[in-house]
Image (spheres, rainbow, N blue to C red):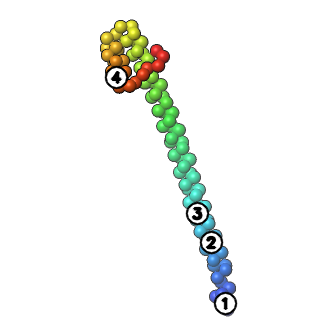
Amino acid sequence: MIQLSRLGTPLTATAVLLILASNLVQLRHGHVELQAELANQGTALASSARVERQLDALAKGTQQLARAGNPNAQRIVAILREKGVSINGG
């Protein structure tokens, strides 16, 4: 018959291995989730950059119209200036 004192070490080793395996699975799952979030962040960042370029082009076009004498564009540029928005180049 197997003595209980001889089972202690193999059972402890098995428990430690199971815990390590569980942690490894959790880490891998977390890594996959982080990769997915990073991809989503890249998509959002690209979209944000596109919107920023569009707004910049719109502001520059409005400033050009204001310089050409368009009263509506002049009002928009004045309001933007009051709000602290500066239009570079254009």
Disc 2 marks which residue? 16
Between label 1 and label 4, give the one nearer the viewer: 4
Residue 49: where, in percent of width, then height?
Answer: 49, 30
Kindly identify which residue carries mark 4: 82
Give the secondary structure at mark 1: loop
Q: CA distance from mark 2 to mark 3?
A: 11 Å
Q: Which residue is mark 1?
A: 3
Amino acid type, callout 1: Gln
Q: Position of residue 68 (x, y in %)?
A: 39, 7
Quadrant in which the N terminus appears: bottom right
Circle 4/circle 3 CB separation < 8 Å: no
Q: Earlier in the sequence, mark 2 or mark 1?
A: 1
Q: Residue at x 41, y 20 (%)?
A: 59
Q: Is residue 50 above or below residue 9?
A: above
- Tag shown at residue 23: 3
Amino acid type assigned to the residue bearing label 4 in the image: Glu
Mark 1 nearby-residue class (10 Å; few <14, some 14–19, many ≥20): few
* Residue closer to the observer: 16 or 89: 89
Alpha-carbon span between mark 1 and mark 4: 86 Å
Which residue corresponds to the image point at 62% horizontal and 66% vertical from the top-left? Answer: 20
Marks 4, 3: nearer the viewer: 4
Task: Inspect the image, locate mark 2, and give the three-letter code of the amino acid beneath it.
Answer: Val
Q: Earlier in the sequence, mark 1 or mark 4?
A: 1
**Label 2 or label 3, whichever comes before in sequence order:** 2
Question: Is residue 58 shown to the viewer in this render?
Answer: no
Q: Earlier in the sequence, mark 2 or mark 4?
A: 2
> Eyeballing the image, is 57 above or below 44?
above
Amino acid bearing label 3: Asn
Mark 4 / mark 3, whichever is N-terminal = 3
